[in-house]
Image (cartoon, rainbow, N blue to C red):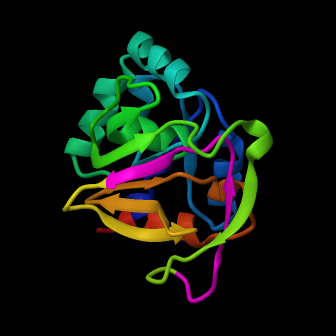
Amino acid sequence: MKTPNNRPVGVLAIQGDFERHAKMLERIGAPWELVKHASDLEGVGGLIMPGGESTTMLKFFANEGLGAAVRQLAAEGKPIFGTCAGAILLAREVLNPPQDHLDLIDITIERNAYGRQIDSSVRGGDCPELSDRPVEMVFIRAPIIRRVGDNVRVLGRCDGLPVLVEQGSILAATFHPELTEDETIHRYFLKKLSH
């Protein structure tokens, strides 16, 4: 699957399983490159922000000037996909405890709301606009989306909760699609690059 102008998808390589995101993109035929510095974003067509520890990621963002660079990418309409901690960073409001964020999608999200690492689980969720079958979802110390703004579309639910949401070019998931063999979510993100 080609991206427009064959521009690579940037994969933020600070924490989390960024290598698994890269392997998923590779498997579905999309060019990618790892992003560690603000200057790395200059040639990308979109960005994936993996999981990790959101407060640690924020410190790295501040030191590297990545926050402003990611906001600029969003202002240019380039798609950004945040999973787990990446979704936390994209949110308008963060709870448990409150923390800085990029304010790129109108959601309120609560950190670690599913519990500790030991409470991690794999579940089937519904994404009716993307798939006619349940989508495998891996939750690891996952956040919960507590509020969805009026202009935010809920694309996926699990156990009645929104777990995949989108607003314009921004896509956020509270689970880890890169840890499964299911390509549904990454393929949907790549379609956003062509709009």
Instruction: Locate the C terminus by quadrant.
Output: bottom left
Location of residue 167 in the rendering, given as x and y in whole percent from the top left corner: 28, 59
User: What range of the chain is rendered magenta?
Assistant: 131-147
Instruction: Locate the N terminus by quadrant.
Output: bottom right
Any part of residue 81 in sight: no
- Residue 135: say if magenta: yes
* Residue shown at the point (51%, 36%) measured from the top left: 111
Number of marks present in the image shown: 0
- Residue 56, above or below 141: above
Q: Looking at this view, is 10 or 21 the one in front?
A: 21
Location of residue 59 in the rendering, given as x and y in whole percent from the top left corner: 47, 14
Q: Looking at this view, is 185 or 161 the one in front?
A: 161
Instruction: Determine which quarter of the picture holds residue 152.
Output: bottom left
Q: Looking at this view, is 79 or 9 the one in front?
A: 79
- Residue 115: say if magenta: no
Any part of residue 27 in sight: yes
